[in-house]
């Protein structure tokens, strides 16, 4: 079986302006930027692993202070992180399909659709 994931991953990296390299693990986060979804945990945790060979793409809208924090990611880590504080359905699908991992730091998750989508796409 031939997987399209490496091609989609490279398209995702190019779309958000990250260096294109299929060997670098890409971590994605898609969600509301608020405490319930663990966005505050995510922002704090990124500094703990961003030194590794990894890229992260964060997509979401919500609390303005958190939107500013995720937008600051690409200033702090220009070749490793992108924060997109917009509602962007095509990019959300591209992240699910192209990322290697989906981060779900929710304090509680009443539904779990993001996990189901990730499983469907092998993410």
Image (cartoon, grey):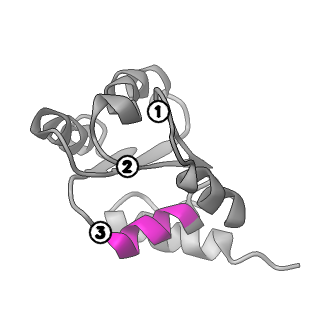
Q: Position of residue 81 (x, y in %)?
A: 36, 45
Label 2–label 1 contact, CB within 8 A: yes
Q: Residues within 10 Å of mark 3 (few under 14, many from 20)?
A: few
Q: Position of residue 22 (x, y in %)?
A: 61, 61
Q: For residue 88, which numbered disc appears in the image?
A: 3
Q: Circle 1 sits in a helix, a strand or a loop, which is it?
A: loop
Q: Residues within 10 Å of mark 1 (few under 14, many from 20)?
A: some
Q: Position of residue 47 (x, y in %)?
A: 39, 23
6 drawn magenta: no
User: Foreground residue, 94 or 47?
Assistant: 94
| Magenta highlight range | 88-96
Q: Residue at x 52, y 39 (%)?
A: 104
Q: Circle 3 sits in a helix, a strand or a loop, which is it?
A: loop
- Measured in 3D between alpha carbons, the distance from the residue under mark 2 to the one under mark 1, in whole angstroms, is 10 Å
Q: 9 left or right of 84?
A: right
Q: Residue at x 12, y 33 (%)?
A: 65
Q: 122 left or right of 19?
A: right
Q: Is residue 24 visible?
A: no
Q: Residue at the right extreme?
A: 1
Q: Circle 2 sits in a helix, a strand or a loop, which is it?
A: loop
91 drawn magenta: yes
Q: Residues within 10 Å of mark 2 (few under 14, many from 20)?
A: some
Sequence-first disc among 3 and 2: 2
User: Foreground residue, 7 or 45?
Assistant: 45
Q: Which residue is mark 1?
A: 106
Q: 97 left or right of 12?
A: right
């Amino acid at each position: 079986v031939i997987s399209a994931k490496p091609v989609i991953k490279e398209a995702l990296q190019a779309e958000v302006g990250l260096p294109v390299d299929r060997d670098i693990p890409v971590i994605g986060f898609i969600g509301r930027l608020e405490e319930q979804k663990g966005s505050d945990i995510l922002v704090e945790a990124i500094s703990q692993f961003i030194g590794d060979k990894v890229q992260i793409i964060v997509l979401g809208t919500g609390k303005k202070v958190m939107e500013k924090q995720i937008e600051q990611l690409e200033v702090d880590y220009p070749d490793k992180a992108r924060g997109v504080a917009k509602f962007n359905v095509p990019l959300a699908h591209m992240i699910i399909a192209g990322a290697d991992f989906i981060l779900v730091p929710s304090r509680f998750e009443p539904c779990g659709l993001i996990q189901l989508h990730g499983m469907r796409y092998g993410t």
